[in-house]
């Protein structure tokens, strides 16, 4: 809603007020027809003012909703923490919940990650999987040990 609409609302209310004053100040000598015409103009001006007031009220409600959404988004931005390889947000009990980096960065959607509690995370929405650096190191070490054990226990060394 812009200033022109608010100005128009104020203008309609002024017109209605002026017509109401005219009717109040008219004396008995004015013909009934002229009085009825002014009364019709008053009703029309009041209807216009009511419509414009409703538009102003709707614009205020829309603005308030936008402010609420922006505040919620700003709070989420402040509370959401990056902990490689995921986003973390504290729940009502203060426990950290993990969210998908891909879903949030691409669509601003919080998709909860499923975890094995050992550094592996999987998003059931985008099917992306993540490992912490510690898990990557652990998996690499296990693979290296398995390969070494296979080489040491091969048929050639028997």
Image (cartoon, rainbow, N blue to C red):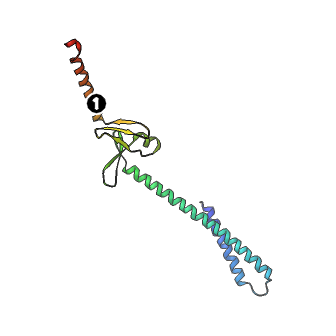
The number of numbered discs placed on residues in the rendered structure image is 1
**Can residue 48 be seen at all in this image of the molecule?**
yes
Which sits in the foreground, 26 or 150?
150
The answer to which quarter of the image holds residue 20 is: bottom right
Residue displayed at 37% across by 42% down: 113
Q: Name the residue under label 1.
A: 139
The answer to which quarter of the image holds residue 131 is: top left
The answer to which quarter of the image holds residue 39 is: bottom right
Q: Which quadrant does the C terminus fall into?
A: top left
Residue displayed at 69% across by 80% down: 21
Look at the picture and state if 139 lies above or below 33. above
**Can residue 11 be seen at all in this image of the molecule?**
no
Where residue 83 appears, x then y in whole percent? Answer: 33, 42
Residue displayed at 46% across by 40% down: 106
Look at the picture and state if 158 lies above or below 146. above
Q: In this view, does 43 lie to the left or right of 93?
A: right
Residue found at the far bottom of this picture: 28
Q: Is residue 145 left or right of residue 85?
A: left
Where residue 145 appears, x then y in whole percent? Answer: 23, 25
SS category of the residue bearing label 1: helix
Which sits in the foreground, 146 or 138?
146
Q: Which quadrant does the N terminus fall into?
A: bottom right
Residue displayed at 38% across by 36% down: 129
Where residue 68 appears, x then y in whole percent? Answer: 47, 58
Which sits in the foreground, 94 or 51?
94
Residue neighbourhood size for the residue with mark 1, other residues' Cα within 10 Å, grouped as few (<14), some (14–19), many (≥20): few
């Amino acid at each position: 809603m812009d200033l022109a609409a608010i100005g128009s609302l104020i203008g309609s209310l002024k017109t209605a007020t002026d017509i109401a004053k005219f009717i109040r100040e008219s004396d008995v000598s004015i013909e009934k027809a002229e009085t009825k015409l002014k009364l019709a103009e008053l009703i029309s001006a009041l209807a216009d003012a009511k419509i414009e007031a409703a538009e102003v009220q709707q614009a205020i409600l829309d603005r308030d909703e936008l402010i609420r959404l922006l505040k919620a988004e700003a709070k989420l931005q402040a509370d959401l923490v990056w902990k490689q390889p995921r986003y973390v947000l504290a729940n009502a009990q203060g426990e950290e919940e993990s969210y998908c980096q891909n879903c949030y960065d691409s669509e601003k959607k919080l998709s909860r990650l499923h975890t094995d509690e050992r550094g592996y995370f999987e998003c059931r929405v985008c099917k992306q999987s993540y490992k912490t650096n510690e898990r990557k190191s652990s998996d690499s070490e296990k693979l290296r040990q398995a390969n070494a054990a296979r080489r040491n226990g091969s048929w050639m060394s028997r």
